[in-house]
Amino acid sequence: LESIPVLASALSSTSIVSQPRAHAVWEIIWLYLTEPQKQKSKKPQIRILRKHLPYCDDDPEAIVIALVQSVVIQSLLALDVNGEVTPVSNHNATHERRALALSIVKVFSGATSVSGKFGTFQLQLPSQLVRTKVLSNTIVQRLFLDIVCAGGGGKSSHHLKPYAMTVLDSISMSGNLSSEDLARRVECTKAFLNREPRFDGRTKSQTCSNLMLFSDMSEENATRCATIWTEYVAYLEEKIILKPKKEAPSPYEMIGYVDLLFSVAKRLLQCPDHEFRTKTIKRIVSLFFVGAFFDSPSLKGKSKESNCILKTATKMRKMSSAFPYAVRITMSSRFFSLLADVSNLLQREENSGKSSIRDLFGEIWTGWSKLEANGAKLLWKPDPTEDDKEDEEYVSREDVSKLLGGFVTPTDGEETLDLSCKILVFILHLHVLRCGERGSGDEDEEMDIDEDEDDETEINQMISDLATTLSDLKSIGKTGQKEKDEDEKENPLNNLAQICVGVLSSPFGNGGQSRGASPTLLREAVKAVWTSGLAFCAGKTDAHSLFDAETVQILLSAVGIDGDDDAQEDDDDDMDGESEEEDDDTDGRVFSKARDMDIDDEDDSNPDKKEDGDENDESDKED
């Protein structure tokens, strides 16, 4: 162990034969440090560190650490212990030296390699050692990011970029999928993401994705990888939820980890393991929901309930403050987008009895209510004035709770229309949430409060109208007979159509920076309300009198078609027809006159006949 710093210069000199493989002395080092593991398959040969080295009492792990520090970092990359470039001129990091460093890191990272001594082999180091020492931040930056990301903008790429990409592919694609190999994959992924949360994006590779085996969503692989996927989600949560006295990453880095969590949830939508998928997606949705809209440090006490929203808020309770504004905006956008994707999936699976939208939305609604009950404060919540409370269209939190009664569990005699309206009310109420005020580092100190208040007023009015319309629809009666004075009684189906059209055409229905794919979420909810409303009315004996011309006019006007346009088009067609007939008649008279005139080319040369023709023309005019 003590001789390694002395031998570092000699070992680094072997870089002149580093391509296509390292010097033979490195094969002797692998052979000395490792021994073959007992395994069923002989290819590739799995080699592990020896417990006791021959003729030496040093720890094999300590020797590996010394090789990485002295040979790779200090000699080959010409860096000091802090990762800074050394001023010594005879330690320049040439292409040959970097290539040898890549070869050594490739073997230590567990990639499949070839040796003249024992053929194809894979070195299996302890996974923690790989993450902390072999793939440290310094090595990931200098050997991968600096090489692969060099060039661009018209500049040529780095000379070693193809080899560095090959090493990344070997690290991510090698392995026998044993428990040790799965642990190695997780730690390698953590090592790359510790340095750069957008590692795959910057290197334009699928390194981290391939390491986590997200491309294979078969039932067998999902069962095998459930543990490492859970560990991966927990790792990303730790990078986002800061512990006390821990240095906070920049908002740029935190947004990168938020996007990674979002991509995990998107991939898990295809996971065949329903229980694991549901549990993990609820966990991610909860993190986005609480982080975007609540001041978690204001939560009082500890909750032992199983609700995922409360569990996430309890984890965030120890944070010194809420997330930066840019991070909250991203969380809000990802929350709405993920909610839209999950709701679409659940709608497709609901008929098979696997899932229910009620479960997911009910979990969020219950957690939201319990958070406020336990003292958690919303980041932005306008205080209603007395005039607001006296307004007939004002909808309080208690009013929404009454409308969503039985939202978590079905009630007796509940219709499909009832559940569809409750889901739309819940989604509309979600759009009242805001991400709070901007931080001091942002361009504007506060959000545009007036615009938010307008949105909330419109949303409250829509919720109130929807509740009234639902009551009117259900009061039609079993026979479907409407009240006698129909001139005074409004058609509830027309009101429902106006509400659906109003939601889709409203400003908040167009989404925004903080609302992601909320238009998709609203559109699917409106579609469910309208179809269930039609189905409800179809069961009435007087259904044809509900869907009248006014209903059609409301729907057509929503897509820019005015009912008067059709009549105008018919009038235009009639006028065009009359005009064509007049043209035909005129053309017929012209040709008949020409025939009566009996004019040919020869007559033009005879002036007498021409005068006669003029006289005939004058007589025709007189006639």
Image (tube, rainbow, N blue to C red):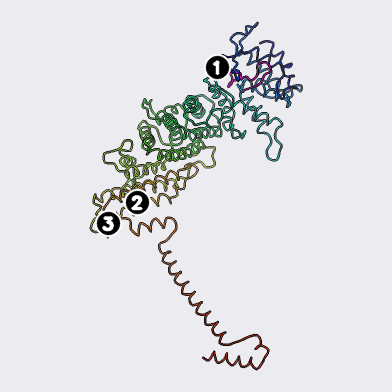
Q: Amino acid at mark 1?
A: Lys
Residue position for label 2:
496
Q: CA distance from mark 1 to mark 2?
A: 67 Å
Position in image of residue 202 (x %, y %): 61, 34
Secondary structure beneath dot 2 equals helix
Residue position for label 3:
489
- Label 3 near label 1: C-beta < 8 Å? no
Residue range corresponding to the magenta coloring? 112-133
Given residues 480 and 361, the one toward you in this image is 480
Residue position for label 1:
40
Left or right: where 496 falls relative to 598: left
Q: CA distance from mark 2 to mark 3?
A: 14 Å
Q: Amino acid at mark 2?
A: Leu
Left or right: where 454 falls relative to 67: left
Mark nearer the viewer, 1 or 2: 1
Instruction: Confirm whether the magenta stretch covers residue 332.
Output: no
x 71%, y 38%: residue: 155
Position in image of residue 519 (x %, y %): 45, 45
